[in-house]
Image (cartoon, rainbow, N blue to C red):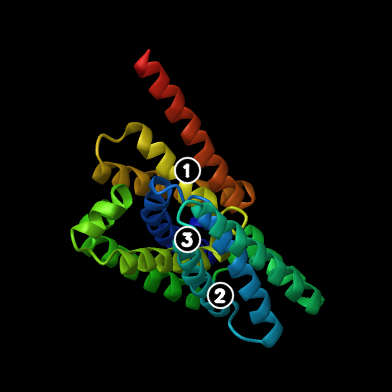
């Protein structure tokens, strides 16, 4: 258990706990609005930004963050243009993100190994600046969700009613999408672009099975994510396993157990 006192593990644990708060907080709204795939979309766009950051010698996560925010505005604009086909905006932006990432990959073959760490996550290699960025995003997301919880609740379940009641629906949609971009662009170095969607959706999927209200579903979602992160990091650190994969597999196991428990209780 010496690993628990190691600096790299403590940084990973601190970063993981912060990501365990922000991803389910945003994920519960995305799942209920049937926008679960937006996580994969913004993750691919962020990877394109990360690749460009390595190419031009600028902080990769920062460039990825800019790409993700721009993409979030584009998604919201396209979602309004194709009101009856909201998923179309996600597919279009994802295609562009993959194309740009492929282009930047070929332009900078020498840094492909570094970019790959962002695809699968490298939480045990976090630097202090990564934690500061994660802390900033965590505070912003937590404060905004707390202050606008009722507005986001109404927006999630009755967007038309929210507009009729005078809420700034357009602004709220943009704000939620931008926060999603912030969370994803920050979290990809922790769990990787290919696995970030699991932290956004699986805790929400578990909580929706057992929660009796929206507030409790948010609490359960965050709790489930934190448990998976802590246990995943400890298991991967002790047995030298891939931390991101361990966390995601634990989440899947928790979902299976929740489904079995729900089925058994119903029976």
Q: Nearer the viewer, residue 199 or 229?
A: 199
Residue 138 in view (yes/no): no
Q: Nearer the viewer, residue 148 or 199?
A: 148
Q: Secondary structure at mark 3?
A: helix
**Picture quarter with the C terminus:** top left
Q: Secondary structure at mark 2?
A: helix
Mark 1 or 2, nearer chain start = 2
Q: Is residue 260 left or right of residue 117?
A: left
Residue 158 in view (yes/no): yes
Q: Nearer the viewer, mark 1 or mark 3?
A: 3
As displayed, is residue 244 above or below residue 213?
A: below
Mark carried by residue 116 = none
| Residue drawn at the location 46% of the way across and 58% of the way down | 16
Label 3 belongs to which residue? Answer: 79
Label 2 belongs to which residue? Answer: 67
Q: Position of residue 148 (x, y in %)?
A: 23, 62
As displayed, is residue 55 above or below residue 187?
A: below
Q: CA distance from mark 1 to mark 2?
A: 25 Å
Q: Is residue 123 left or right of residue 104?
A: left
Q: Position of residue 153 (x, y in %)?
A: 26, 52
Q: Position of residue 40 (x, y in %)?
A: 57, 56
| Residue drawn at the location 40% of the way across and 66% of the way down | 179
Q: Nearer the viewer, mark 1 or mark 2?
A: 2
Label 1 belongs to which residue? Answer: 202
Q: Residue furthest left?
A: 165
Count of numbered tags: 3
Q: Position of residue 113 (x, y in %)?
A: 75, 69
Mark 2 or 3, nearer chain start = 2
| Residue drawn at the location 42% of the way across and 47% of the way down | 31
């Amino acid at each position: 258990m010496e690993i628990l006192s190691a600096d790299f593990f403590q940084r990973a644990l601190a970063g993981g706990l912060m990501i365990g708060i922000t991803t389910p907080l945003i994920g519960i709204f995305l799942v209920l609005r049937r926008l679960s795939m937006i996580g994969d979309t913004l993750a691919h766009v962020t990877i394109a930004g990360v690749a460009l950051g390595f190419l031009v010698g600028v902080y990769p996560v920062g460039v990825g963050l800019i790409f993700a925010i721009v993409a979030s505005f584009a998604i919201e604009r396209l979602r309004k243009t194709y009101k009856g086909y909201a998923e179309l905006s996600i597919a279009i932006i994802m295609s562009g993100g993959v194309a740009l990432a492929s282009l930047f990959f070929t332009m900078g073959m020498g840094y492909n190994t570094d970019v790959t760490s962002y695809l699968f996550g490298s939480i045990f290699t976090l630097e202090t600046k990564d934690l500061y960025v994660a802390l900033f995003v965590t505070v912003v997301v937590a404060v905004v969700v707390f202050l606008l919880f009722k507005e986001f609740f109404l927006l999630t379940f009755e967007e038309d009613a929210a507009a009729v009641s005078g809420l700034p629906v357009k602004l709220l949609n943009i704000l939620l999408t931008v926060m999603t971009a912030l969370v994803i662009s920050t979290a990809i170095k922790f769990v990787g672009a290919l696995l970030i969607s699991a932290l956004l959706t699986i805790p929400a999927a578990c909580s929706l099975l057992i929660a009796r209200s929206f507030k409790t579903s948010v609490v359960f979602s965050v709790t489930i994510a934190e448990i998976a992160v802590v246990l995943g990091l400890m298991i991967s650190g002790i047995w030298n396993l891939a931390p991101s994969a361990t966390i995601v597999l634990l989440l899947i196991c928790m979902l299976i157990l929740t489904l079995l428990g729900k089925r058994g209780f119903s029976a």
